[in-house]
Image (spheres, rainbow, N blue to C red):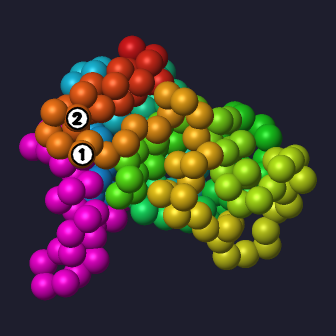
Amino acid sequence: MIETYTNYIDKYLCKIGLAGTRSPGEHHFVSTYLLQKLYSINSIVPDYVNPDGTKCITGDIVYFLNGKHHLGIEVKLGTIRLTKNEYNTWIVNPDITNHPELFIGIGTKGIAIQKWQSFREAYAKSIDCSDINSLKAIPSGYGKQKSVNEFFNYTKTGEFYARGKNQSEAISNESLFVVQLRRAIGC
């Protein structure tokens, strides 16, 4: 079990994997760290986990309630890379009924957790757009990519938690992150 997000960063993001391979992706982070944290908070197994290719499912971790979308969490590891559909629907389109509810981004410097509207605004600023309403839909490809580590500079107080410099700090920062995660999912 991975005790803290700092442990995850140290083991999987700051070191080269077996035989020089890349770090695992966001699906690995979700399955080995984030799901256990969520379950420890709400004791509910999500209805969908990483439903790539299922366009009507909003987020990487999705909970339904009474047969309808209830909570969607979008996770990015290392780089914020939004597909054309994600960018156009979740960033350009202001209709929140089609947005995930939460963003979680993890990089070598730490972890961020934001309500989706706060993420939209910070993402727009991070790609040098001062007015989110001026963003235009893209016909193909991906929205502008942003390093998660660089994106952290655009988060507000209480949305970013630094990688712990030692085990004591890692545990302290983890506690703060889990409190914010609990609040964010409404528990």
Front residue of this view, candidates 177 and 65: 177
Question: Bounds of the magenta span?
Answer: 1-26
Q: Using residue 61 as the reference point, say whether residue 85 is left or right of it.
A: right
Location of residue 170 in the rendering, given as x and y in whole percent from the top left corner: 22, 38
Location of residue 18 in the rendering, given as x and y in whole percent from the top left corner: 12, 78
Q: Which residue is located at x 79 percent, y 41 percent?
A: 94
Amino acid beneath label 2: Glu
Q: Which residue is located at x 19 percent, y 84 percent?
A: 20
Q: How many marks?
A: 2
State if disc 2 and disc 1 touch (CB < 8 Å): yes
Q: Is residue 116 above or below residue 32?
A: above
Q: Given the current orientation, which residue lies at the most extreme front position?
A: 165
Q: Secondary structure at mark 2?
A: helix
Q: Is residue 169 above or below residue 26?
A: above
Q: Is residue 63 visible?
A: yes
Residue under label 1, please give it.
165
Which quadrant holds the C terminus? Answer: top left
Q: Given the current orientation, which residue lies at the most extreme right position?
A: 134
Q: Which residue is located at x 16 percent, y 33 percent?
A: 168
In reply to whether residue 90 is colored magenta, the answer given is: no
Residue under label 2, please give it.
169
Front residue of this view, candidates 45 and 180: 180
Q: Using residue 61 as the reference point, say whether residue 13 is left or right of it.
A: left
Which quadrant holds the N terminus? Answer: top left
Q: Using residue 152 as the reference point, say whether residue 28 is left or right of it.
A: left
Amino acid beneath label 1: Lys
Location of residue 77 in the rendering, given as x and y in whole percent from the top left corner: 41, 58
